[in-house]
């Protein structure tokens, strides 16, 4: 009789609180079931999601969309038009060579390049530089666009999503490149102008590092976007704040630090420098919000101050 009661007790559910280990076991089991269901289909969810008007894509420019740095190519074009002397060209050439070999942004080199460019354009009209930018794109930049990254941007456009360049390069250059590639627009560093003439100063600070994240955050708010459904692409660890802001971060032609971080975070990687074919575009793991201060950057990128 006792044996029968014991068996009955074993079949009867017992009321007891779940332990931490049992909760963990339950969650693990549910996750395994969910994954097994996905594996049966053998397909990843569609990405980019067609018709998702709350999603957009943000692309860094230098070494992500284009081989090398836009500012250096711009400098070559200005030299050709006798905006500055041979010794300045030598400095631009050295900076570009270093950038291409190292594949990363050196703060001192980038600052020197910005200072040089500002001194060169001082006193010139904005309209003049915009027109020259169109010519320089054809001469030096068009052939340096990474086809793989271009295809990623086009996938977002084909899905009906907006695609923005986000770069520390001058906004005039960024806008030319965005227009030539058929993208929505560009956020970039703005040089101050008064009555349509460059003063040789910046409006605020360069759109670099954390400032990019703040610009993306502000633009997303203005456009009514859901950042968890947006994608961002960059080659540089300096852009981790921007990449961490979106739900779908991609490391493109990554430097060593970004490659390591992306692997730790299970982000998607694409490297078009090796000649390997890009894998099918898929949804990467969502990243936590990691943007930091730089609140005026969006205004800098979106508006040119005129007095």
Image: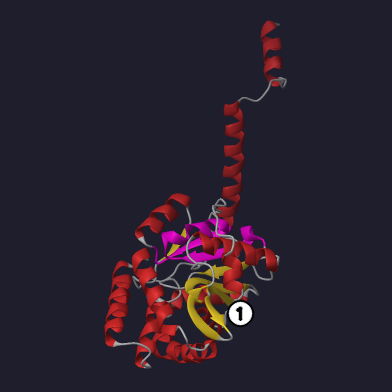
In the rendered structure, the answer to whether residue 51 lies left or right of residue 44 reads right
Compared with residue 243, is residue 70 higher up or lower down, i.e. above or below? below
Which quadrant is home to the N terminus? top right
* Residue 60: image location, x then y, percent: 48, 69
Callout 1: 10 Å neighbours few (<14), some, many (20+)?
Answer: few
Position of 106 relative to 151 (above/below): above
Of 65 and 263, nearer the camera is 65
Q: What residue is rendered at 43% in x and 86% in y? A: 142
Q: Which of 243 and 222 lies nearest the eye of the viewer?
A: 222
- The colour scheme used to paint the residues is secondary structure
Residue 268 lies left or right of residue 302; in this view the side is: left
Name of the residue lying farthest toward the top:
1
Residue 55, image x, y percentages: 65, 66
Residue 242 within the magenta-colored segment of the rendering? yes
Q: Residue at x 47, y 91 (%)?
A: 132
Residue ID at (41%, 58%): 258
Residue denoted by label 1: 306
Name the quarter where the C terminus is drawn.
bottom right
Q: Is residue 257 visible?
A: yes
Give the residues in magenta.
226-254
Closer to us: 120 or 151? 120
Q: Is residue 43 visible?
A: no
Relative to residue 95, is residue 253 drawn left or right?
A: right
The percent position of residue 44, horizontal first and vertical second, equals 56, 60
Magenta segment includes 160: no
- Residue 199, compared with residue 246, is above or below; it is below
- The mark total stands at 1
x and y, in percent, of residue 43 in the image: 56, 61
Between 82 and 59, which is closer to the camera in this rendering? 82
Give the structural element (helix, strand or loop) at label 1.
Answer: loop
């Amino acid at each position: 009789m006792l044996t029968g009661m014991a068996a009955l007790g074993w079949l009867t559910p017992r009321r007891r609180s779940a332990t931490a280990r049992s909760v963990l076991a339950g969650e693990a089991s549910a996750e395994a079931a969910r994954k097994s269901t996905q594996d049966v289909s053998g397909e990843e969810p569609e990405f980019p999601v067609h018709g998702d008007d709350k999603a957009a894509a943000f692309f860094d420019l230098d070494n992500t969309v284009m081989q090398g740095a836009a500012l250096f190519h711009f400098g070559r074009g200005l030299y050709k038009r006798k905006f500055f002397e041979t010794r300045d060209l030598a400095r631009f050439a050295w900076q570009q060579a270093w950038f291409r070999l190292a594949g990363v942004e050196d703060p001192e080199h980038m600052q020197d390049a910005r200072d040089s460019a500002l001194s060169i354009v001082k006193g010139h009209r904005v309209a003049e530089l915009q027109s020259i930018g169109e010519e320089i794109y054809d001469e030096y930049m068009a052939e340096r666009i990474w086809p793989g990254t271009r295809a990623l941007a086009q996938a977002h456009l084909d899905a009906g999503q907006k695609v923005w360049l986000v770069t520390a390069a001058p906004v005039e250059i960024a806008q030319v490149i965005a227009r030539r590639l058929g993208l929505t627009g560009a956020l970039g560093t703005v040089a101050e102008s008064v009555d349509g003439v460059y003063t040789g100063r910046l409006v605020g600070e360069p759109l670099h590092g954390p400032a990019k994240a703040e610009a993306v955050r502000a633009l997303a708010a203005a456009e009514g976007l859901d950042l968890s459904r947006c994608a961002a692409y960059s080659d540089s660890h300096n852009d981790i704040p921007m990449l961490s802001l979106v739900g779908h971060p991609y490391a493109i032609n990554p430097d060593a630090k970004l490659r390591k971080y992306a692997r730790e975070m299970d982000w998607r990687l694409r490297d078009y420098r090796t000649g390997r074919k890009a894998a099918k575009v898929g949804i990467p793991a969502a990243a936590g919000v990691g943007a930091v201060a730089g609140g005026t950057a969006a205004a800098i990128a979106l508006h040119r101050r005129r007095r």
